[in-house]
């Protein structure tokens, strides 16, 4: 019997991109059995970063966050796996890399709570909203082969 797959959305953030960690981060994602459904290299405008993080508008770090997120290119992707949202948040680790467990992406690649290398959706609903922010249905693909 098959199992229920679900999706999450991720961004490799400007700090990780500028330090050359795209390959290292994608390797950890793939080694942990996430499948890529969609992926692109892009850069957010300040307005787009503001819209993406609108939920944090009242937070004191909002302006800093959207300045940072629009400061350089990012890699965005939709990932598929059983329990994708929960398992991906385990893989990326605590928002603050100082509190992240060993073996997590943020422990390995992030430098601060603001410049924390990677984003992962916090719910199935937000995974859909965030995926739709970046990708049309024509940009999503599944790899099919005889053994899966
Ligand atoms: P992310 O998972 O992308 O979701 C919201 C982001 O806000 C979070 O990662 C952090 O990068 C950022 N953030 C959260 N708390 C702070 C903070 N205290 N100072 C600066 N940025 C923060």
Image: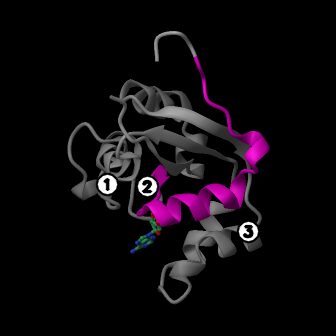
Which residue occupies the extreme front position in the image? Answer: 1
Identify which residue is drawn at 57% across, 44% down.
Answer: 78
Find numbered disc 2 in the image and state the secondary structure of the residue it sits on.
loop
Mark 2 close to ligand 1, CB under 8 Å: yes
Asked if residue 51 is among those painted magenta in the image, a careful observer would answer: no
Q: Which residues are magenta?
A: 117-144
Chain-order first, disc 3 or disc 1: 3
Residue 97's disc is: 1
**Residue 116 - label:** 2
Picture quarter with ligand 1: bottom left
- Measured as percent of width and height from the top left, residue 6 is found at 45, 46
- Check contact, mark 1 vs mark 2: CB within 8 A: yes
Name the side, left or right, on which 124 lies relative to 105: right
**In what element is the residue under mark 1?**
helix
Residue 48 numbered mark, or none: 3
Query: Residue 4, percent across and down?
Result: 39, 41
The circle on residue 65 is none
| Nearest to the observer: residue 125 or residue 50 | 125
- Seen at 62% across and 71% down, the residue is 66
Question: Mark 2 near mark 3, Cβ–Cβ under 8 Å?
Answer: no
Report the residue at 60% width, 51% height from top. 14
Dot 1 crowding, Cα within 10 Å, few <14, some 14–19, many 20+: many
CA separation in Å, label 1 and label 2: 7 Å
Instruction: Determine if residue 71 is in view.
Output: no
Q: Quadrant of residue 124?
A: bottom left
Front: mark 2 or 3: 3
- Marks 3 and 1 in Cβ contact (< 8 Å): no
- Tally of marks: 3
């Amino acid at each position: 019997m098959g199992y229920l797959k679900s999706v999450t959305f991720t961004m490799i953030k400007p700090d990780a991109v500028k330090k050359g960690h795209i390959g290292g981060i994608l390797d950890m994602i793939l080694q942990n059995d996430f499948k890529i459904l969609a992926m692109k290299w892009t850069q957010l405008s300040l307005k787009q970063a503001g819209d993406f993080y609108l939920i944090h508008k009242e937070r004191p770090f909002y302006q800093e966050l959207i300045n940072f997120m629009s400061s350089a290119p990012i890699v965005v992707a939709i990932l598929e796996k059983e329990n994708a949202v929960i398992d991906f948040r385990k893989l990326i680790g605590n928002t603050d890399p100082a509190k992240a467990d060993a073996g997590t992406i943020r422990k390995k690649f992030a430098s601060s709570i603001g410049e924390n290398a990677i984003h992962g959706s916090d719910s199935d609903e937000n995974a859909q909203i965030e995926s739709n922010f970046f990708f049309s249905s024509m940009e999503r693909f599944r790899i099919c082969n005889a053994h899966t």
